[in-house]
Each structure stands twice: as structure tokens, then as C-alpha cells.
Amino acid sequence: YKHTLKEQAIDVTAQTAISNDNVSLSIDGVLYVKIIDPIAASYGVSDPYYAITQLAQTTMRSEIGKIPLDKTFEERENLNIAIVTSINHAAANWEFSV
């Protein structure tokens, strides 16, 4: 396996999420990911970038579902913190940093 140790930008494709007050939103994002340990990244999961992208999408939908539409822009920073924390916790075994 070959991995770059440089920070990489990964697009999180647009998806539909439903807010706490049942409003559909289209959300997307960008993750900045850096491999800390290439051996753990190679053998910890079969496709680490795909796994992180899927985890980001799931976490984004989950966090948006906790708040009403009116608060989505106000809570943007808290959403980012929750998403990054969740991904870093799950990706710790793969030696990735988001």
C-alpha cells in the first residue's frame, strides 16, 4: 500500500438530511484528512477514505436531525465540532486525523 502523508481534502457528496422539525435539507461538506500512521491506515480498514466519508455522512445526518431548521446556521460551529469529534474517535484506530 502507498499513502501520502500530506493533508488531503475529501469531498462529502450532497445528501438529504431531515431536521428536528421535519424539514428536508441538502447538505455536503469537505473533510481535511491526514494519515498519521500509514501501516495502521493500510491494515485497519480496507478503504479508509471511503470509511471516513461514510462516517462523515452518517454523522452529518444524525447531527442535523437533532436541531430545528432555524438553528442550523447558528449551530454550524457546534455541528462541525460534533462531526470532527465523532470521526476522530472512530478513525483513531486507523491513525487518521480530521
Image (cartoon, rainbow, N blue to C red):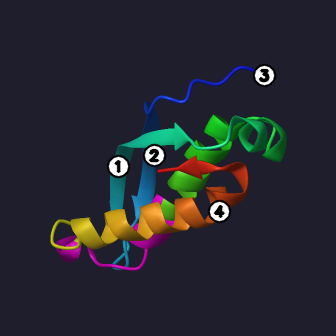
**Relative vertical location of residue 98 with respect to residue 87 in this rendering, above or below:** above
State how far apart marks 3 and 2 are (Cα). 31 Å
State how far apart marks 1 and 2 are (Cα). 5 Å
Nearer-N-terminus badge (1/3): 3
Question: Can residue 23 be seen from the camera position used here?
Answer: no
Nearer-N-terminus badge (2/4): 2
Give the number of the mark in front: 3 or 4. Answer: 3
Residue 10, image x, y percentages? 46, 33
Examine the residues drawn in magenta and state their main secondary structure.
Answer: helix
Amino acid type at image mark 4: Ala
Residue 92, image x, y percentages? 65, 59
State how far apart marks 4 and 1 are (Cα). 25 Å
Tag count: 4
Name the secondary structure under disc 3: loop
Q: Quadrant of residue 88?
A: bottom right
The residue labelled by disc 1 is 26
Nearer-N-terminus badge (1/2): 2
Q: Residue at x 57, y 24 (%)?
A: 4
Quadrant, the N terminus = top right
Q: Which residues are magenta?
A: 60-71
Name the secondary structure under disc 4: helix
CB within 8 Å, label 1 to label 2: yes
State how far apart marks 2 and 4 are (Cα). 21 Å
The residue labelled by disc 2 is 15
The residue labelled by disc 3 is 1
Residue 90 image label? 4
